[in-house]
Image (cartoon, rainbow, N blue to C red):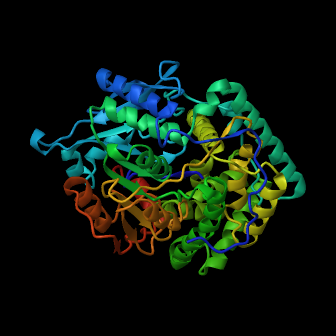
Amino acid sequence: MRAVAKFGAVAGLVSLVLTTLTVPPAGAVHPADGFAGATAEAHGTAVAAARAASTGIAFGACPEEEGLPKPVTCGTVRVPLDYAKPSGRQIALTVSRVRASGPSAERQGALVYNPGGPGASGMYFPMAAELPEWKRIARAYDIVGYAPRGVGRSAPLSCQDPADFIKAPTPAPTHPSPSYKQERIAQAKAYARGCARKAGAALTHYTSLNNARDLDVLRAALGEKKLTFMGASYGTYFGALYTTLFPGHVRRMVFDSAVNPDPSRIWYRNNLAQSVAFETRWADFRVWVAKHDATYKLGATPKEVARSYEQVRAELALKPAGGKVGPGQLHAAMLSVGYHDDYWPLRAHALSAYLKDDPKPLIAQAAPRPDTAKETENSNAVYTAVECNDAPWPDDWKIWDHDNTQIARVAPFETWDNAWMNLPCAFWTAPRQQPVDVRTQPGELPTTLILAAERDAATPIEGAHELQRRLDGSVLITEEDAGTHGIGGGGNACVNAYLEDYLLRGKTPVRRASCAPHPEPDPVSLDRRAEQRKLPHAV
């Protein structure tokens, strides 16, 4: 489930008949221990946290490769690779911070943020302290980001040569042929072998449970007796695991765009649900483009917009734009419209310009970037390792083929792309875990806050409802008739008011509340963009 949320300005499920997962996956399955009782992992986490509390984090100038401006400072926290062996091999996680800007009397501690993934880095998050939506929160809290294990410079994972990973152009059939499916099966097998070969015995330790344990060690290293945390997208899942492992260590916790934590849905069925939900969001984009046909000339109805898109796909299959943008690269770029409507004007403009014989905007938005190839491949490697390790997956290709063929009949936009991304999990050789049954008992956990957009495609809103059912006393804030993935600190003042009330004052509604949607994006015509390019101050 690639569900990476932006923080604010920077950056349910359709009923289907699906195959029941009854065939055990490849590789051994062992229970996800450490969430109750005096297990080896629980003891190891306590040992590592005590060590981190004693050592702290030596913050200083950030390495140049992080690209972080002053006053952001950086440091590292050491955690065990294997929590069952807390004195064994240690790995260093990179951490970034901006100190609270208000007087010491206002300071409430550190606010730690994770943007999702798996595989995304939160190192950039302290820069949010300068944004208007975050300034009041940044007066009271040190704003802390970090790169989870495997990500960036935090014991980085790799499964494939980055140059090979971004090779282009590539096809992207919505209804793949049997021969194309066999090609992708071979690629998935090779990718899984690459992960096992490059990571070796360490591979099994890149899991959501270990991400939750790492979070507790980071809490201790920051000198916090209790954790204040905001997780977006995948960050909500290991945040939920944290509440189950360490309920007494939680101060305040925000779940922004929640993954469905039901163990039966981690991760295979959550990805099927995501594929269905993306079809709805793709339709929303086409409705918006049709509404602004005077600007984009892509069609006055959603069907006409779809035909324009298919025309671009067909032309790119015959002649890739710039030699690098084929249907696969086009589709990857267009998936972003399902995450955030800020992308709508950009992608509509690129399609419109291409059909007017100007491929440059599309090339700029969709062509692979060699300068970020290493980061892109690393992110995908971590994503794959965590999701494949976390839970059983079907190892029978017939199950994948049946389920995704069925879904693609009604939701073709994302379905097969999602399947190919996750297919290495069918051929995984590292041991699998059984997902933890996330839930807390009455009075065990302070009030937590869940934020959700009603039409979120990456994490459909049923996940927020399921999380609320499992976390006693949690409160749900819904942005109605909107589909942004990651809404906290963004463009909805109502949502931000609830977020501030909770983080700054500990105040929430009794159980649920809703906000009207943020305004739709403003279309930008090609003529207006041309005029803006003439202005020296134009962006």
Q: Is residue 32 above or below residue 401?
A: above
User: In terms of depth relative to the viewer, which is nearer, 181 or 69?
Assistant: 181
Q: Is residue 356 above or below residue 27?
A: below
User: In terms of depth relative to the viewer, which is nearer, 299 or 103?
Assistant: 103
Q: Residue furthest right?
A: 179
Residue 151 on image: x %, y %:
52, 34
Residue 336 on image: x %, y %:
55, 57
Q: Is residue 309 above or below residue 227?
A: below
Question: Relative to residue 168, is residue 245 drawn left or right?
Answer: left
Question: Relative to residue 223, is residue 147 drawn left or right?
Answer: right
Q: Residue furthest bottom?
A: 301
Q: Can you see residue 282?
A: yes
Question: Relative to residue 175, is residue 435 drawn left or right?
Answer: left
Q: Residue furthest top?
A: 88
Residue drawn at the location 62% of the way across and 26% of the way down? 202
Kindly indicate the quadrant of the structure image that contains residue 425: top right
Q: Is residue 436 above or below residue 274?
A: above
